[in-house]
Image: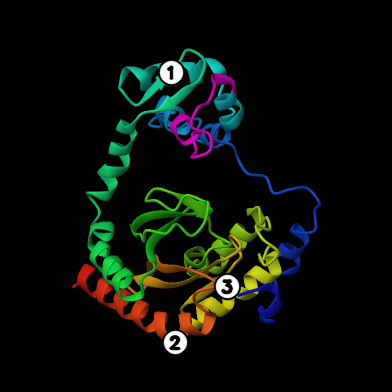
């Protein structure tokens, strides 16, 4: 849904709207500050939290980092970063060339522990594969993780549509992705307003909805219709459609989407041909999970 087609609905409260008028960018707490918030909890392991933050500092485009770079990204003191990296190296999760550090494949075992233990990702795979076979497009499943969506299952095609990483374990901003909007629309009003208050809504393309008021109105429509199309808002040429997956109580548990190239599949085809197949897959998956 583009800015031009965003419907006019009920607005934000004056208090929330005023919070958006500040010229300062939203404050995003660093890992160190989030860890510091648990000071005083006798059962909280600061060292473990710091180690996880160091692992998460690495990204697809920044696979080799110095201690100074990791410290800057996390705001964790360099001495603590050095100890975390030393421990990760000893355990086989990281390596160094003497100046920079990088993760080793053993890190994947941490994610595998989740993927192999949750019925959601395992159960979803056959449905994603079936959708991909029927539609000849990449199909994905994601959950909401903070302000991002986290890819937990995927059935890919040979052709890669966009430059960003869409592999399992990859993350994308929730506000400009179809699955993200499904998951954001499922939040209660208080949580949604908190998100809109803190989210860094940057325009990824000229089509990206990055105004909090417009995004709220878009999410209200998603709530009502139960599905979402995002048209070239994450990257030029990428068009996607998403539907929710429900748990036994009717709450949104995850989202399914199909990603297409805008020059190959029109919006009307997404609605008329893709959407019924996706709704059926979501319904059957939910029925299997909670039968």
**Residue at 40% of width from left, 72% of height from top?**
244
The quarter of the rendered structure image containing the N terminus is: bottom right
Q: Dot 2: few (<14), some (14–19), or many (≥20) neighbours within 10 Å?
A: few
Which image quadrant is residue 32 in?
top right
**Residue at 66% of width from left, 81% of height from top?**
7
Which residue is tagged 2? 272
Q: CA distance from mark 1 to mark 2?
A: 52 Å
Of residues 149 and 17, which is closer to you in this image? 149
Q: Position of residue 107 (x, y in %)?
A: 34, 34
Which type of secondary structure does the marked residue at label 3 adopt? helix
Which residue is tagged 3? 219
Counting residues from the N terminus, which is met first, the one under dot 1 or under dot 3? 1
Select label 3 or label 2 by which is in front: 2
Instruction: State whether residue 66 is above or below residue 181.
Output: above
Q: From this viewpoint, is residue 154 visible?
A: yes
Which type of secondary structure does the marked residue at label 1 adopt? strand
Counting residues from the N terminus, which is met first, the one under dot 3 or under dot 2? 3
Which image quadrant is residue 252 in?
bottom left
Residues at circles 1 and 3 in contact by the CB criterion of under 8 Å:
no
Q: Position of residue 257 (x, y in %)?
A: 42, 68
Which residue is tagged 1? 96
Residue at the extreme bottom: 272
Select label 1 or label 3 by which is in front: 1
Counting residues from the N terminus, which is met first, the one under dot 1 or under dot 2? 1
The quarter of the rendered structure image containing the C terminus is: bottom left
Q: Which residues are magenta?
A: 54-68
Residue at the extreme left: 291
Q: Is residue 93 magenta?
A: no
| Mark linked to residue 153 | none
Residues at circles 3 and 2 in contact by the CB criterion of under 8 Å:
no
Q: From this viewpoint, is residue 248 visible?
A: no
């Amino acid at each position: 849904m583009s800015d031009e087609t965003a419907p006019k609905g009920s607005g934000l409260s004056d208090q929330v709207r005023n919070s958006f008028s500040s010229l300062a960018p939203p404050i995003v707490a660093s890992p160190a500050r989030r860890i510091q918030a648990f000071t005083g909890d006798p059962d909280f392991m600061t060292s473990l939290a710091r180690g996880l933050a160091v692992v998460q500092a690495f990204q697809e485009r920044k696979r080799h980092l110095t201690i100074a770079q990791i410290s800057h990204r996390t705001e964790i003191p360099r001495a603590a970063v050095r100890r975390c990296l030393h421990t990760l190296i000893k355990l086989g999760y990281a390596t160094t060339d003497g100046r920079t550090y990088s993760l080793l494949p053993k890190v994947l075992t941490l994610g595998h522990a989740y993927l192999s233990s949750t019925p959601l990702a395992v159960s979803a795979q056959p449905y994603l594969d079936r959708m991909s076979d029927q539609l000849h497009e990449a199909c994905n499943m994601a959950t909401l993780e903070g302000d991002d969506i986290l890819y937990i299952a995927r059935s890919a095609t040979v052709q890669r549509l966009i430059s960003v990483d869409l592999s399992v374990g990859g993350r994308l901003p929730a506000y400009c992705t179809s699955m993200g909007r499904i998951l954001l629309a499922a939040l209660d009003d208080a949580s949604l307003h908190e998100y809109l208050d803190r989210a860094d809504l940057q325009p990824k393309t000229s089509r990206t909805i990055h105004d909090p008021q417009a995004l709220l109105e878009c999410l209200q429509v998603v709530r009502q219709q139960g599905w979402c199309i995002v048209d070239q808002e994450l990257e030029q040429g990428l068009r996607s459609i998403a539907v929710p997956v429900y748990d036994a109580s009717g709450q949104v548990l995850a989202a399914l989407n199909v990603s297409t190239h805008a020059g190959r599949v029109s919006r009307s085809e997404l609605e008329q041909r893709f959407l019924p197949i996706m709704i059926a897959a979501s319904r059957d998956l939910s029925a299997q999970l909670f039968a």
